[in-house]
């Protein structure tokens, strides 16, 4: 074969390779993307990010790769990186409701609730049947303290998916925030009907019963919450509060102690136990020295900014007979107390000034 023929064949082959190069690049990008999905499904977000990054080097216009890399960043708690990737996905594909919903959730985690609401609203505009976008926007409204608007969104989510247990639960919380306890109880009951191990629903229904003054039903629900989640420190703490109000001090002490064991940073449990040891009308249960230690811990956990906890510490000092410290701490508690409660704190100050401890 003539050399000229070899040159012609080589040129043809080079042309084929040049034509096929973008195809091979696309195939490589797809391979990286698919492996990234596999890593992501296995929970290895770092390897997923590495593969999506390689896919994007080969195909910078792959909106799905940006979207999924954003999800991986978000699962790692790196919300700024997630938002940057969602921004890129939206630039490439501006009509995907899922991306707006995801970017909204990233803003949500950053407590940028207004920006989150804008994104959730865009997702709903693009897909009026997007159940999760309504639910997430409800959460954002609730975090802004706008419970009535949250209820509207939770209701819309429920109308789209009547078996959406978390929507009932969250609507119950919003109802409870508005002191609509019967409506809250109805929603929690609906959530429990969909999942009889829904610990948070039992716990919050217990709070609603407690607010209505039905202590026995509250105890039953806190007990169910504990059965569903034996590590629920809040349920133990709140059940302890009711036992104490019923004069069942041994049970109250046991529940407060278990709450502290489960969550050593739950300041309210230290405070509750300290208050019982400081002020109980039954002499057998008072222990001023232990009360001082517990109340001090509660105050430390709240940076000495909680008036009630400081009031408990003052009561603990008074129980030990240390009225100088009781007056000093009670003064700080009174200064921090809201205006409508200052008279109560002043009354305890006057009590300690007369060298008398507080008794319930």
Image: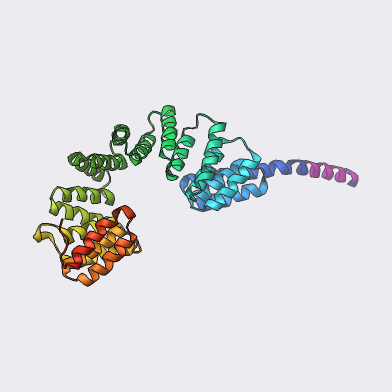
223 left or right of 109 in image: left
Closest to the observer: 58 or 8?
Answer: 58
Measuring from the top left, give residue 59's x and y in whole percent. Answer: 67, 45
State which quadrant residue 183 falls in: top left
Residue 290 seen by the camera? no
Q: Is residue 269 above or below residue 221?
A: below
Asked if residue 50 lies in the magenta stretch, the reply is: no
290 left or right of 9 in image: left
Q: Is residue 208 above or below residue 72?
A: above
Measuring from the top left, give residue 108's x and y in whole percent. Answer: 49, 46
Asked if residue 13 lies in the magenta stretch, the reply is: yes
Magenta span main SS: helix
- The image quadrant where one finds the N terminus is top right
Q: Residue at x 58, y 45 (%)?
A: 86
Q: Which residues are magenta?
A: 4-16
Q: Residue at x 59, y 47 (%)?
A: 85
Closest to the observer: 17 or 306?
Answer: 306
Measuring from the top left, give residue 280's x and y in whole percent. Answer: 14, 57
């Amino acid at each position: 074969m003539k050399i000229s023929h070899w040159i012609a064949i080589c040129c043809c082959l080079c042309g084929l390779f040049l034509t096929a190069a973008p195809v091979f690049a696309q195939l490589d990008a797809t391979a990286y993307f698919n492996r990234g999905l596999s890593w992501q499904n296995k929970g290895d977000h770092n390897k997923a990010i590495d593969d999506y990054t390689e896919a994007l080097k080969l195909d910078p216009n792959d909106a799905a790769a940006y979207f999924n890399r954003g999800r991986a960043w978000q699962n790692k708690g790196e919300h700024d990186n997630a938002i940057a990737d969602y921004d890129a996905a939206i630039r490439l594909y501006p009509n995907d409701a899922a991306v707006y919903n995801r970017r909204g959730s990233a803003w949500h985690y950053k407590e940028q609730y207004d920006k989150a609401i804008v994104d959730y609203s865009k997702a709903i505009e693009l897909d009026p049947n997007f159940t999760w976008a309504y639910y997430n926007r409800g959460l954002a409204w609730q975090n802004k303290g706008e419970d009535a608007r949250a209820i509207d969104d939770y209701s819309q989510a429920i109308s789209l998916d009547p078996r959406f247990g978390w929507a009932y639960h969250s609507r119950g919380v919003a109802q409870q925030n508005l002191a609509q306890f019967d409506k809250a109880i109805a929603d929690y009951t609906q959530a429990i009907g969909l999942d009889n191990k829904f610990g948070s629903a039992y716990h919050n229904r217990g709070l609603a019963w407690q607010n209505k003054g039905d202590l026995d039903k509250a105890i039953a629900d806190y007990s169910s919450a504990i059965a569903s989640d034996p590590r629920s420190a809040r349920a133990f703490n709140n059940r302890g509060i009711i036992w104490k109000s019923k004069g069942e001090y041994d049970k109250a002490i046991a529940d407060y102690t278990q709450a502290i064991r489960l969550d050593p940073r739950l300041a309210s449990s230290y405070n509750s136990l300290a208050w019982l040891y400081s002020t109980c009308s039954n002499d057998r249960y008072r222990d001023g020295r232990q009360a001082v230690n517990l109340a001090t811990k509660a105050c430390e956990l709240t940076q000495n900014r909680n008036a009630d906890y400081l009031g408990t510490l003052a009561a603990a000092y008074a129980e030990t007979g240390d009225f100088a410290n009781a007056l000093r701490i009670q003064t700080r508690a009174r200064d921090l107390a809201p205006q409508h409660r200052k008279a109560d704190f002043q009354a305890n100050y006057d009590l300690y000034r007369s060298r008398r401890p507080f008794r319930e």
